Image (cartoon, helix red, strand yellow):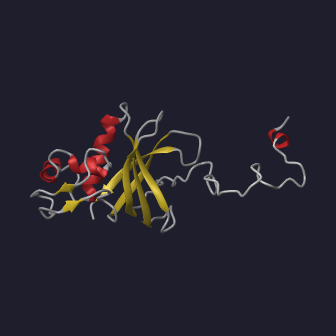
Amino acid sequence: MSAASKFQKAKGDSKPASGGRRRASRFSGVNSGGDRDPLLRASKNKQRVRVIKTWEDHVKGKDPYFKVSVEVLESDVHEVGEKVSIIQCTSSAAIDSALPRIKAFVMNAVGCPPRKDAMYATFDPDGDFLELVMASDDIDSYTAPENEIGIEEGTEFGPNPLEGIELEVIVSRGKECGQGEDDYYRNFQWIQS
């Protein structure tokens, strides 16, 4: 018996199974593939994006990921206004490469030049701002100390501190990781603007 024939209703039976008034289903309008934004695609050209939200996603039974939801402002491979994601696996197997990549992203977002870790440390000596960006349960706010980046001492940051920041990036194609056209690893070169 096919699934289609097993679940067909008899003609004229259009009442809900309960026989009463139907409430709205929590599945109404849900996409079976989830409501995931596409990933930022590779391009030889610079792309400009605006940060919407950053967080570390923990799904039981799956690897954790640091996720950045962005709106495309300028791109030759995405529509302006399109919402896309940037992801970085933060599993124990990937952590050695993940943390430096996440830090490079955050350093660029706060205006710190690439590979100037000592300068960044004047702003975030214990990594608490990075934890706030990752939406860690341990940190819910951060106050900027005196620093060499140029962020005013005493500036208060709350949840989602990078929201609204505009960034420029060149995304290059890494090795294949799946079967679809967009299933490949991405390498990000953040451009200081």
Q: Quarter holding the C terminus?
A: bottom left
* Residue at image location 36% in from the left, 58% down from the top: 169
* Residue at image location 48% in from the left, 52% down from the top: 39
Residue placed furthest toward the right: 11
Q: Quarter holding the N terminus?
A: top right
Residue 69 lies in what quarter of the image? bottom left
Which of the two residues, 61 or 107, is positioned nearer the viewer here? 61
Taking 13 as reference, is 154 above or below it? below
Q: Position of residue 118 (x, y in %)?
A: 13, 48
Residue placed furthest toward the top: 93
Which of the two residues, 131 or 107, is positioned nearer the viewer here? 131
Total labels drawn? 0
Which of the two residues, 73 or 147, is positioned nearer the viewer here? 147
Q: Position of residue 145 (x, y in %)?
A: 11, 56
Residue placed furthest toward the front: 20
Which of the two residues, 22 or 168, is positioned nearer the viewer here? 22
* Residue at image location 27% in from the left, 61% down from the top: 192
Report whether 9 appears left or right of 179.
right
Q: Position of residue 174 (x, y in %)?
A: 44, 43
Taking 6 as reference, is 32 above or below it? below
Report whether 133 appears left or right of 154.
right
Q: Position of residue 49 (x, y in %)?
A: 39, 63
* Residue at image location 38% in from the left, 57% down from the top: 53
Taking 151 as reference, is 102 above or below it? above
